[in-house]
Image (cartoon, rainbow, N blue to C red):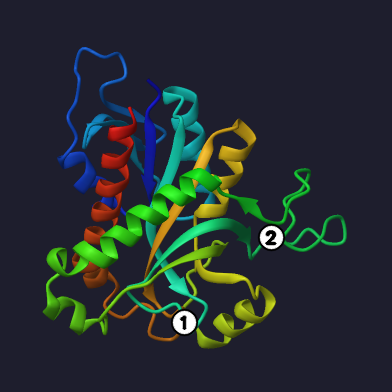
């Protein structure tokens, strides 16, 4: 059975999944593999066959990791989890965005191609898999409605200004830039009025998955407002909020997948 590939640019999220992984050492693809300065772990998580990797930050790193994981493990689908900065006032810290499409906000090959268009693909938006997006949305909704307050302490949520969380579905902007300046945020929001948030890997993974015919989905936890305070308490948010979010959403998603097997 082809595995589900789970990638993250955040090491802590990958390590958390690795800790709960069960490895079949008799399988030729079980256990750990190292390639291109990346570690890949294959086994089962919550009953589903999974391969997990830490992509590191940025589009080149994410594309390299995705290409190798497709070549070696032939996954049925790829899920990317991690953090993002909001581009909309209604998308708040602690909310979740499940991507329906991704766009490279820093790609500009004019006049040869339209702004944001991926050269030779004829696409400015890279869509995610509709069915996978539906499954990830359901997993995220279940987490924020029924599990969030049991997983993340109330004091921690309050310290980051989180009371309740909302799951959004829509476009995600991607570029090799950590957006942490209010003027840049405003410009991006005006130029890409459909984009809900911004991150640094998703569009690259989406392009590689598209070119190889692999289903792809992305889930992002909103850590900041892509403004002047974006770097404040980043590590604390990652450890105390984002990792429990990703782990809980993936648990729901993988458990549901196990019931389909």
Q: 219 or 19, which lies in front?
A: 219
Relative to residue 94, is residue 202 depicted above or below? above
Residue sitting at x 41%, y 48%: 135
From the image, tell me which residue sits under label 2.
Answer: 107
Residue sitting at x 33%, y 29%: 34
Q: Quadrant of residue 124?
A: bottom right
Relative to residue 79, is residue 125 depicted above or below? below
Other-residue count near label 1 (Cα within 10 Å), few / some / many at <14 / 14–19 / ≥20: few
Q: Percent x, y for residue 84?
A: 43, 67
Total labels drawn: 2
Q: Is residue 202 visible?
A: yes
From the image, tell me which residue sits under label 1.
Answer: 90
Q: Quadrant of residue 109?
A: bottom right
Residue sitting at x 15%, y 41%: 19
Tell me: 58 left or right of 220. right
Q: Quadrant of the C terminus?
A: top left
Q: Is residue 242 visible?
A: no
Residue sitting at x 21%, y 40%: 18
Q: Percent x, y for residue 42?
A: 29, 28
Q: Percent x, y for residue 120?
A: 78, 43
Q: 55 or 207, which lies in front?
A: 207
Q: 184 or 117, which lies in front?
A: 117
Q: Which mark is residue 27?
A: none
- Whichever of callouts 2 and 1 sits on the residue coming sooner in the sequence is 1
Q: Quadrant of the N terminus?
A: top left
Please name which of the two marks, 2 or 1, marks the residue nearer to the observer: 1
């Amino acid at each position: 059975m082809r595995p589900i590939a789970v990638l993250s640019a955040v090491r802590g999220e990958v390590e958390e999944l690795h800790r709960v992984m069960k490895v079949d050492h008799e399988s030729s693809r079980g256990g750990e593999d190292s390639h291109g300065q990346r570690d890949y772990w294959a086994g089962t998580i919550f009953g589903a066959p999974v391969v997990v990797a830490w992509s590191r930050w940025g589009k080149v790193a994410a594309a390299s990791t995705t290409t190798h994981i497709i070549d070696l493990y032939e996954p049925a689908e790829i899920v990317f989890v991690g953090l993002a900065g909001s581009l909309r006032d209604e998308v708040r810290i602690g909310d979740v965005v499940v991507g329906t499409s991704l766009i490279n906000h820093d790609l500009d090959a004019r006049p040869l191609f339209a702004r944001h268009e991926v050269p030779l693909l004829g696409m400015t938006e890279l869509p995610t898999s509709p069915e996978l997006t539906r499954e990830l949305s359901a997993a995220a909704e279940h987490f924020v409605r029924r599990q969030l307050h049991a997983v993340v302490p109330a004091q921690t949520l309050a310290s980051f200004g989180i009371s309740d969380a909302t799951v959004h579905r829509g476009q995600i902007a991607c570029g090799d830039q950590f957006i942490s300046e209010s003027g840049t945020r405003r410009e991006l929001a005006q130029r890409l009025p459909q984009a809900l948030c911004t991150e640094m890997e998703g569009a690259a993974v989406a392009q590689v998955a598209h070119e190889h015919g692999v289903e792809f989905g992305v889930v992002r936890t909103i850590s900041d407002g892509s403004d002047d305070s974006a770097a404040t308490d980043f590590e604390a948010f990652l450890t105390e909020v984002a990792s429990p979010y990703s782990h809980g959403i993936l648990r729901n998603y993988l458990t549901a997948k196990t019931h389909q097997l």
